[in-house]
Amino acid sequence: MKKYISYYRVSTAKQGISGLGLEAQKAAVRSFLKCEDCIEAEYTEVESGKKNDRSELKAAIAHAKATGSTLVIAKLDRLSRNAGFIFALKDSGVDFVCADMPDANTLTIGIFAVLAQHERELISQRTKAALKAKKAKGHILGTPANLTREARLKGIEVRKRNAQNSKENKQAVHFILAEKEKGKSFRQIVDKLNGLGYLTSKGKRFGVSSVYKLYKKATLKAEA
């Protein structure tokens, strides 16, 4: 029987103690593996996604390497947003599998890491530039009281919608890359994406052009 080392990560100590998020990850892994006896050991990390010093993950990788087991995680984003960190995992030679994206391999996970890190850097740069421009115009920063209740609610809704679309776009990129490796045409991929309910960053259904652009952007970043 194939053996697995499971790795879970929660962002706060409160989640680690209460089991919020952790139990969902464990359930996802068990459902994916369809067994419990095959899980040789479990490692749980309580750490922010922005940090990359993951002692529990390092221990899980070492355990998997020593026993020839496969590292399994519930969600790909539980690893890291840092490209270098994921590449280090890939280069360790340890087999790994993601319950939410079983088709992910060393190519697609590397592309995902590059895209995720690039997105985080762009968001940071845009935020700093916007704050600097506001400050230069005399705006007082960090004062929610200056906003009307309607404006605050609208801002929250926009952020939620953008976050959802961003997450869907990342998953769509994974799906597109995996399907192209299987030899599927862009039209076939479009039909599957729309059938699964994925939307573009603008909240629209996918078309051949939008899928092709995502594919080219991902492959060009991987080659750079």
Image (cartoon, helix red, strand yellow):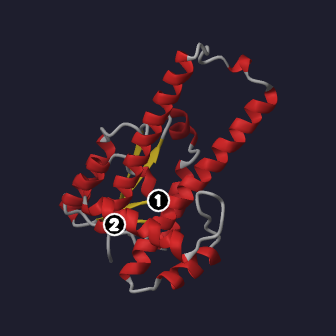
Residue 177 x, y percent position in the rendering: 40, 72
Image coordinates of residue 215 in percent, x first then y, are 42, 69
Q: What residue type is labelled 2?
A: Thr
Please rate how many residues cluster around mark 2, counting C-alpha atoms within 10 Å: few if below 14, some from 14 to 19, many from 20: some
Q: How far apart are marks 2 and 1 (CA)?
A: 25 Å
Q: Is residue 142 above or below residue 154?
A: above
Comparing 124 with 31, the one in front is 124
Q: Is residue 21 left or right of residue 148?
A: left
Which residue lies at the image location 36% right of the left edge and 37% below the top edge? 51
Instruction: Determine which residue is flagged by label 1.
Output: 74
Q: Residue at x 47, y 58 (%)?
A: 75
Residue nearest the observer in this picture, 103 or 216: 216
SS type, badge 2: helix
Which quarter of the rendering shows the N terminus?
A: bottom left
Q: Residue 3's spot in the image, x, y percent? A: 32, 69
**Residue 159 position (above or below residue 60):** above
Quadrant location of the C terminus in the rendered image: bottom left
Which of the two labelled residues, at mark 2 and mark 1, occupies the earlier sequence position?
1
Circles 2 and 1 in contact, beta carbons < 8 Å:
no
Q: Looking at numbered disc 1 in the image, what kind of residue is underneath it?
A: Ala
Q: Residues within 10 Å of mark 1 (few under 14, many from 20)?
A: many
Residue under label 2, please give it.
219
* Residue 7 location (% of width, % of height): 39, 54
